[in-house]
Image (cartoon, rainbow, N blue to C red):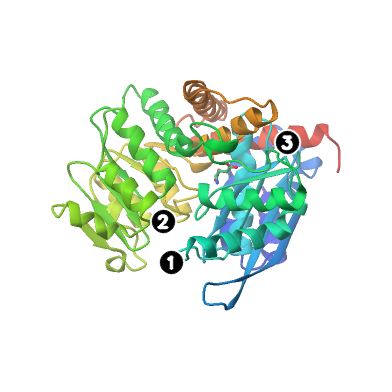
Amino acid sequence: MPYVHETLEALRRSSPAQTEFYQAAEEVLECLRPLFERSPHYLDQGIIERIVEPERQIMFRVCWTDDSGKVQVNKGYRVQFNSALGPYKGGLRFHPSVTSGTIKFLGFEQIFKNALTGLPIGGGKGGSDFDPKGRSDVEIMRFCQAFMSELYRHIGPTTDVPAGDIGVGAREIGFLYGQYKRLSGRYEGVLTGKSLNWGGSLGRKEATGYGAVYFAENMLEARGETLEGKTCLVSGAGNVAIYTIEKLYELGAIPITCSDSRGTLHHARGIDLALLKELKEVRRVSLAAYLETHPEAHYIPTRDYPNDGHAVWRLKGDVAFPCATQNELIEADAEALLGNGVTCISEGANMPSTAAAVDRFLAAKVAYGPGKAANAGGVATSQLEMAQNSSMQQWSLEKVDAKLKEVMTHIHCQCADTAAEFDDSTNLVLGANIAGFRKVADAMIEQGVV
Ligand code: GLU
């Protein structure tokens, strides 16, 4: 279909060097070919050209003073990608690797992810190239206040509701919220992932990880299997990885790895979750410190795998949970996982597998849950937080968790049913992209050319 090809070529010309964004756009558009053959009206309506172009992109300067008195300057971004289904919704990422292309790819993925939840939320994303690593709490506060000093005029509980992502957790959301309140004079649900003390939702912190595990359960159940007794490989050591590990233990599985930017931890008898939480949530130190308590565990420094994949994926496991970052799992990793007998991959991170790695998984017909489906539990629970804020209620953990489970099952059903509808029943990438796209595209058509 020349149309898809031309749209991708036009994107390359108009947005130079946004490689992660092309990667995300290419995957979605390639999956849509069979849909366009059956429903050419999407092409007549120019939906493809409209959906790859953000409705609005905000870029701003963030100036703040570090502890030594030096003025620091960072870039700030918010991409308001698509509001056909509801207010823009998506996290903020603070990481030195962040560029406008990173935020655009994340915002694009968010549109389809949010659509798959079935909840009324549009897609957006934001962030900064600010590196929180090694910064004091007061520096983090000053940075967050400076960032919000510009962002506050672009967001609101019915327009755009940011949340956390890599480098943005409850501490940062607190500082961002305080500054929003000071500048706007309003106490309202403008951010999610808030502290439980003042408007946060029970279960939000755990939701992305728990959701990725529920999604794996759904995929395995469709194949007559469960997670019980399965050895699991998890990458990352942030919020998503920690609560993936927690839920895996609850379901009788054995998570044996986690990783941070400096190295991979392999503990054959299972990761010590209490210690992991202590190292990452309280002390905020490198995973290498784990060996002080468990000298029998293995620590593999990242530098031993330069540009050649990731140590986590070279270990033997039944189920894999990539929960670190984009493109952390390359083709050689996929090959190693398949060679070691992996049967299920559920992505807690956004686009963690390269396009070539995804092709390997699909060709092998293992159970593969792409991030935009498998990690949607976080944003879904953010929407539950919005619902609680606007009705001035606080739901029980049981209620939130039951709803999260329901949403993950709903997403799995949509992906599987849509994949079957297009005669490729094991291909949940195809199912996720077509189901997510169709929901957004139909809303855009009904709302007219705006
Ligand atoms: N950053 C998360 C994601 O990638 C959560 C976004 C949200 O809760 O708004 O979906």
Residue 240 horizontal side relative to residue 144, left or right: left
**2 or 3: tag closer to the N-terminus:** 3
Q: Position of residue 65 (x, y in %)?
A: 60, 72
At label 3, which amino acid type do we have?
A: Gly
> Who's the residue at 30% across and 60% down the image?
263
Which residue is labeled 2 in the image?
A: 328
Residue 145 position in % (x across, y down) = 64, 59
Q: Residue at x 45, y 64 (%)?
A: 133
Say above or below: 323 vs 42: below
To which residue does mark 3 refer? 86
Which circle, 2 or 1, is nearer the viewer? 1
Looking at this view, name the residue that lies furthest to the left.
296
The circle drawn on residue 163 is none
**Viewer-proximal residue among 88 and 61:** 61
**Label 2 – label 1 distance at C-alpha:** 23 Å
Amino acid at circle 2? Glu
Mark 1 near ligand 1 (CB under 8 Å)? no
Q: Residue at x 59, y 63 (%)?
A: 143
Picture coordinates of residue 146, whole percent (x, y): 66, 63
The residue carrying mark 1 is 134
Q: Quadrant of the C terminus?
A: top right
Q: Secondary structure at mark 3?
A: loop
Front of the two marks 2 and 3:
3
Q: Earlier in the sequence, mark 2 or mark 1?
A: 1
418, 310: nearer the viewer = 310
Q: Say if residue 80 shows up in the picture.
A: no
